[in-house]
């Protein structure tokens, strides 16, 4: 999973990186690709992993409702653009 659409979800103010990571880890996934640009970002991701608590269904619903208001598909996921 690309948990933050290569940074575009956070840049769009839809959700934080930590929310995206927590959402992804709350799903039944085998792996998560979490790119970082700085050591600080990596450390923030490690902290999110160490303090992880699975999202409750209500939290997932709230996050998905926010996501539905943002751009989708190729408009936000640059790697889907021709």
Image (cartoon, helix red, strand yellow):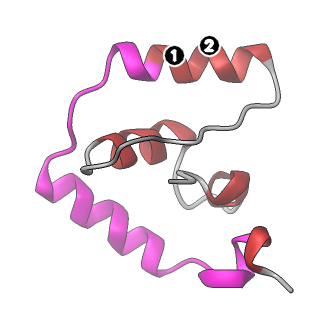
Q: Residue furthest front?
A: 30
Mark 1 residue crowding within 10 angstroms, few (<14) / some (14–19) / many (20+): few
Helix, strand or loop at mark 1? helix
Task: Give the percent coordinates (x, y) of residue 36.
Answer: 73, 31
Q: Position of residue 8 (x, y in %)?
A: 71, 60
Read off the magenta span.
48-77
Could you tell whether 11 is left or right of 68 in the image?
right
Q: Is residue 57 left or right of residue 62?
A: left
> What residue did someone put label 1 on?
46
- State the residue at coordinates (22%, 53%): 59
x%, y% of residue 82?
86, 86
Residue lying at the far left of the rendered structure:
57
Measuring 62% from the left and 13% from the top, which residue is drawn there?
43
Count of numbered tags? 2
Vertical comparison of 71 with 33: above or below: below
Residue under the point 46% across and 71% down:
67
Q: Are marks 2 and 1 in contact (CB under 8 Å)?
A: yes
**Up/down of 26 relative to 41, above or below:** below
CA neighbours of label 2 inside 10 A, class few (<14), some (14 to 19), many (20+): few
**Residue under label 2:** 43
How far apart are the alpha carbons under marks 2 and 1? 5 Å
Residue 21 falls within the magenta-colored stretch: no
> Would you place residue 81 above or below residue 24 in this image?
below
* Left or right of 36 in this view: 54: left
| SS assignment for the magenta stretch, majority | helix
């Amino acid at each position: 999973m690309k948990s933050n659409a290569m940074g575009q979800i956070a840049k769009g103010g839809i959700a934080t990186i930590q929310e995206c990571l927590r959402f992804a880890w709350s799903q039944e996934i085998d792996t998560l690709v979490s790119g970082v640009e700085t050591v600080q970002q990596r450390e923030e991701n490690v902290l999110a992993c160490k303090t992880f608590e699975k999202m409750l269904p209500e939290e997932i619903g709230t996050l998905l409702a926010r996501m539905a208001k943002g751009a989708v598909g190729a408009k936000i996921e640059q790697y889907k653009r021709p």
